[in-house]
Amino acid sequence: MDFLYGLFIAPFADFAFMQRALFGSLMLSLGACPVGVFLMLRRMSLSGDAMAHAILPGAAAGFLLYGLEILPMTIGGLIAGIIVALGAGAVSRFTIQREDASMAAFYLISLAVGVLMVSIRGSSVDLMHVLFGTVLALNNEALTLIGGIVVVTLASLAIFWRALVAECLDPLFLRSVSRMGSPVHFIFLGLVVLNLVGGFQALGTLLSVGLMMLPAAAARFWTVRVEPMCVLAVLIGFASCIAGLLLSYHASLPSGPAIILSAGVVYFFSIVFGSRGALRARIVHHRHRTA
Amino acid sequence: MTNACLTFRDLTLGYGSHPAIHHLDGIVEKGSLTAVVGANGSGKSTLMKGIVGVLKPMEGAVVRAPGVRTAYLPQQSELDRSFPARVVDLVSLGLWPKRGMLGRYTREDRESVGKALMAVGLGGFETRPIDTLSGGQLQRTLFARVLLQDADLILLDEPFNAVDAKTVGDLIQLIKRWHGEERTIMVVVHDLDLVRQNFPETLLLARQPVAWGDTKETLRPENLLKARRFHEAWEENAPWCEPSEHDHGHDHGHDHDHHDHARTHDHGSGPRAA
């Protein structure tokens, strides 16, 4: 019993920084995982990845001007992310270029600018910090920020749920019955940026998209409806955060990668064993029904 | 004229600077059932998109009578079949005009979804994932959604593609039921026999309207021949459509249409009143 307590409970009970890390990452999962589900269903998984990179120059600008402070870096990241999301979204809406190409173009430019800016002032340690985050150093400001983002995300999802589903399922139909199509698209992109920015303090700009995409991708293998998929993604996110933090505590590993890696393990498990996964699809059915 | 559901005023629709519908004038009457026929690229789908408002006119206007609710079944649906949704979820989208984005679905709403599915012969398909439907079943599902939209103006763009003969019959019955309910319906169809048997009015398109009115009149051999001579490809260097020239053409076309239409009206209202 003591062994189990030491393994699972003690790290969180004994250390305030672990409690903060747990609290922060669980909140993050609550908002980011459902957003990830829609990102995946809209086939924008790589756009999410691109957007995570796009946040870098904004965060770097904040870092250049104010040093390693959360608020300026977050606001900078938010602005950069929104510019890239709107720019890429507008290019794909109003020209013949698809979103994947415009997104790639915008984020590559953005990433180059960001790395240049960080390297002008900081050391490579700073660069690592911005790229990979520090979930173990979440202060009150960061937790408040994440809390706010979660509330905004869940409220927006609740309000725009039906429009979002319609926009994913049959965009032309939505355009024929309402003018919500374009606004919903941009609101959704806004939510993606918001959650990536929320995640970057904890997980870094490169890995914050991991907590968004991996649980969603794993949940896809278990259910055929959107609502349960979102719930499942959040649960997988929770489990990954707890497992990742414990792993990082006991094995002295960096916490961000440990969390994402835990989600990765769930993802691989789901690919193979999920009710719509590889194994189920490969099993030859010797029996079939009459109709 | 007060009876118009749709009014086209010198309507030009197109892509780039090339028109796909060129200076269309005329009215679609309330409660009429019109087949839209023409060769590939003659502007049928473009006209539908223009009416719904998905495509903005290059010139002129489509005027919908105030308060007209429109349902549109596109030829090339942008439906994502891999999206994890069930048949009910897809059909329930048809409740949008009634419930909007936030309104809760009531028990009557759910019952009406079930009834709409029964009407297209898909009773019991409620919980089937949409990626397991066949092409024809999906088409009928989309019909159920149109049914649920309870629209005054119904636009169907090639609804009979990939649909078996029996289902075509079922869908035609459904369209006739709508017609009986005084809804205005426009259907893009390729099968001229089907048009002759079931549609009182026909619009024959070849970028410009070749003929518009009573089906028997419109589908006369000389009109069909005229439509067949239509040149599908647009030319990069086609001359610009000059205002003076088009005014002339427009006046001419308008008179012609108007005339045609007045006759159709007489013709059409006779049997309906009987």
Image (spheres, coloured by chain):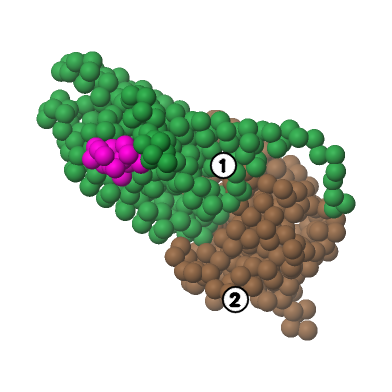
Residue placed furthest toward the bottom:
B274
Amino acid of disc 2: Glu
Q: Is residue B109 above or below residue B63?
A: below
- Please tell me which residue lies in front, A74 or A26: A26
Which colour denotes chain B? brown
The residue shown at (49%, 50%) is: A231
Q: From which residue to which does the magenta span run? A: A9-24
Residue placed furthest toward the left:
A66
- Pinpoint residue A265: horizontal percent, then vertical percent: 51, 31
Label 2 sits on residue: B108
Is residue A20 located in the magenta-colored stretch of the structure?
yes
Q: Is residue A210 above or below residue A170?
A: above
- Please tell me which residue lies in front, B63 or B264: B63
The residue shown at (37%, 53%) is: A154
| Residue contact between numbered discs 1 and 2, judged by CB atoms under 8 Å | no
- Pinpoint residue A117: horizontal percent, then vertical percent: 21, 20
Position of the N terminus of chain B by quadrant: bottom right
Label 1 sits on residue: A220
Position of the C terminus of chain B by quadrant: bottom right
Crowd class of label 1 (few under 14; some 14 to 19; many from 20; radius 10 Å):
many
Give residue A222's quadrant in the image. top right
Q: What's the distance in space between the residues labelled 1 and 2, CA to CA?
A: 32 Å
**Residue B245 visible to an observer of this rendering:** no
* Left or right for A238, reference B165: left
Q: Label 1 lies in what chain?
A: A
Amino acid of disc 1: Arg
- Pinpoint residue B51: horizontal percent, then vertical percent: 55, 58
Which colour denotes chain A? green
- Please tell me which residue lies in front, A61 or B44: A61
Crowd class of label 2 (few under 14; some 14 to 19; many from 20; radius 10 Å):
few
Q: Secondary structure at mark 2?
A: helix
The residue shown at (54%, 38%) is: A218
